Image (spheres, rainbow, N blue to C red):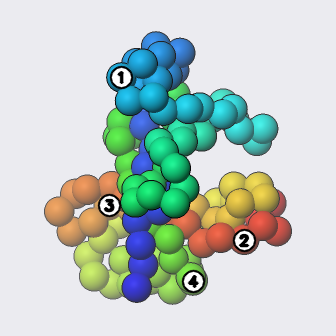
Amino acid sequence: MARLIHFEMNVKDVKKAMAFYKDVFGWEFQKWDGPMDYWFVMTGDENEAGIDGGLGNAEEGFPKMVNTIDVVDIDNIIKKIENKGGEIVRPKHAIPGIGWLAYFKDSEGLIFGIMESDPNAK
């Protein structure tokens, strides 16, 4: 069974958003050292229920909030999505050192990410 593993917030003012979530909820942020401006969001103790996420810059035409689902075989899931009436809105691409990511629109128009872990992804 696939689990929800990550949320992503896409905002216009990253510093303002970080200050808000830190002050209101105590969330911590860590800059990713990858090829784009992106921050990891730590929402609490790893041993407690919940998920962590990410914070990035908003892009025109892309949702401000996206949830990501962990999958074992992203290529197989992409085929299933398309066969069941979903649509791939951002093709599979590497997140270096982390894995493979794609975004899809479900049968109701909601956008989600799907991630296959692969530390060798480039």
Question: Which residue has dot 4 on it?
Answer: 73
Question: Which residue has dot 3 on it?
Answer: 105
Q: Position of residue 117 (x, y in %)?
A: 65, 70
Q: Is residue 13 visible?
A: no
| Amino acid type, mark 1 | Val
Judging from the image, what secondary structure is the residue with disc 2 in?
loop
Mark 1 crowd level (few <14, some 14–19, many ≥20, 10 Å Cα): few
Question: Which residue has dot 2 on it?
Answer: 118
Judging from the image, what secondary structure is the residue with disc 4 in?
loop
Question: Which residue has dot 1 on it?
Answer: 24
Near-viewer residue (77 or 39): 39
Residue 49 location, quadrant: bottom left
Numbered disc in front, either 4 or 3 = 4
Whole-angstrom CA distance, mark 2 to mark 4, is 11 Å
Numbered disc in front, either 3 or 2 = 2
Left or right: 101 in relation to 6 = right
Whole-angstrom CA distance, mark 1 to mark 3, is 31 Å
| Amino acid type, mark 2 | Asp
Mark 2 crowd level (few <14, some 14–19, many ≥20, 10 Å Cα): some
Instruction: Tell which circle, 2 or 4, labels the residue nearer the N-terminal end.
Output: 4
Left or right: 94 in relation to 7 = right
